[in-house]
């Protein structure tokens, strides 16, 4: 009996090949750090693009961050905004939760990964939600195959995640203030390791993308994106900035190399704030 062109490939080998393909694409991008600080959740990434954001708002207390192919995770972000708006409008704003959104993303990514009809998504995601107290904060990390991890303290995805995570394990302090947490996160992203390391990099302010979910904000929407001026005030003098070497991303692999989103209506494709449900009267 003919086995077809290329012969037989076992399911185990097929899944391994798809996982290797997704991991390779994700590792070409630059890392994103998500960590808890005294007043909420902080997201920091090295992203020279001023228009194509890796970190965005989903709903009142929920944020989204991603690494990998921009067009793929932008479609997921838009779908998350629509799901949150629909649930908040049909039921109650309190029914929109980070856990529910993470589960929805896990189902989508898992289905795509196990399907033989299309390639797996080359993305990893953070879904963060803040509560009324630090103990109620939630940070979920989702991988390309739909696995969900409930992170505590800090988490890293994309790029040289192991090196960044090692630095954070040594320097992260639970309950730190915003300025201290930001300095540690930025230093971790610029940290280099190994025999070929030529000293840690000082990432330019303009190459940083920073946003927070801040429970102390009086507005119902707790998401805030930092301007270069605010970053300069928080980080202070860090020495001469060193630009990163030539990007390693493949075309369309990260926001640094834009790829037009496929599908969707264009909500937020210019990198601006995503739509959210109207505030209560």
Image: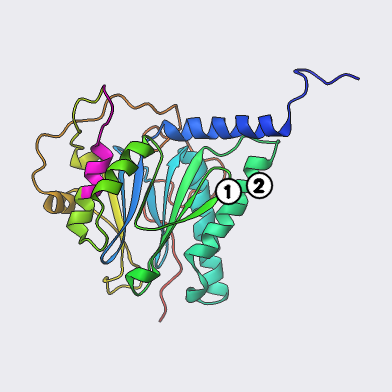
Q: Quadrant of the C terminus?
A: bottom left
Label 1: state its secondary structure. Answer: loop
Looking at the image, which residue sits at the far bottom? 281
Q: Measure how far apart labels 1 and 2 are at the Cα level.
A: 8 Å
Task: Please name the residue shown 55% across and 48% down the image.
Answer: 264
- 1 or 2: mark nearer the eye: 1
Above or below, 133 relative to 203:
below
Marks 1 and 2 in Cβ contact (< 8 Å): yes
Q: Where does the image place residue 68, in percent across and percent down from the top left? A: 45, 38
Side of 175 relative to 249 (left or right): left
Task: Please name the residue shown 25% across and 63% down the image.
Answer: 175
Bounds of the magenta segment = 184-195
Task: Please name the residue shown 46% across and 35% down the image.
Answer: 26
What residue does disc 2 label? 111
Above or below, 168 relative to 277:
above
Q: Where does the image place residue 6, in percent across and percent down from the top left? A: 75, 18
In reply to whether residue 113 is colored magenta, the answer given is no
Side of 215 relative to 179 (left or right): right
What residue does disc 1 label? 146
């Amino acid at each position: 009996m003919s086995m077809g062109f290329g012969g037989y490939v076992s399911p185990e080998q097929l899944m391994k090949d798809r996982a290797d393909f997704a991991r390779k694409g994700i590792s070409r991008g630059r890392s994103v750090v998500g960590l808890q600080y005294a007043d909420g959740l902080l997201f920091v990434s090295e992203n020279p693009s001023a228009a194509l954001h890796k970190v965005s708002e989903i709903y009142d207390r929920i944020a989204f961050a991603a690494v990998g192919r921009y067009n793929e995770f932008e479609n997921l972000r838009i779908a998350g905004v629509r799901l949150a708006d629909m649930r908040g409008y049909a039921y109650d704003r309190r029914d929109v939760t980070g856990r529910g959104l993470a589960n929805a993303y896990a189902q989508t990514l898992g289905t795509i990964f196990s399907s033989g009809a299309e390639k797996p998504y080359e993305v990893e995601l953070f879904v963060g939600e803040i509560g009324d107290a630090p103990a109620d904060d939630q940070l979920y990390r989702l991988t390309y195959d739909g696995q969900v991890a409930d992170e505590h303290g800090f988490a890293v995805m994309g790029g040289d995640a192991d090196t960044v995570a090692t630095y954070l394990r040594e320097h992260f302090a639970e309950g730190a203030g915003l300025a201290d947490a930001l300095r540690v996160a930025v230093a971790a992203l610029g940290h280099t390791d190994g025999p070929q390391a030529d000293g840690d990099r000082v990432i330019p302010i303009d190459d940083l993308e920073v946003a927070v979910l801040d429970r102390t904000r009086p507005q119902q929407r707790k998401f805030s994106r930092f301007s270069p001026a605010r970053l300069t005030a928080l980080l202070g003098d860090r020495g001469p900035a060193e630009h990163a070497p030539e990007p390693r991303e493949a075309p369309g692999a990260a926001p640094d190399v834009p790829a037009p989103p496929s599908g969707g209506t264009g909500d937020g494709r210019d990198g601006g704030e995503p739509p959210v449900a109207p505030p209560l009267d």
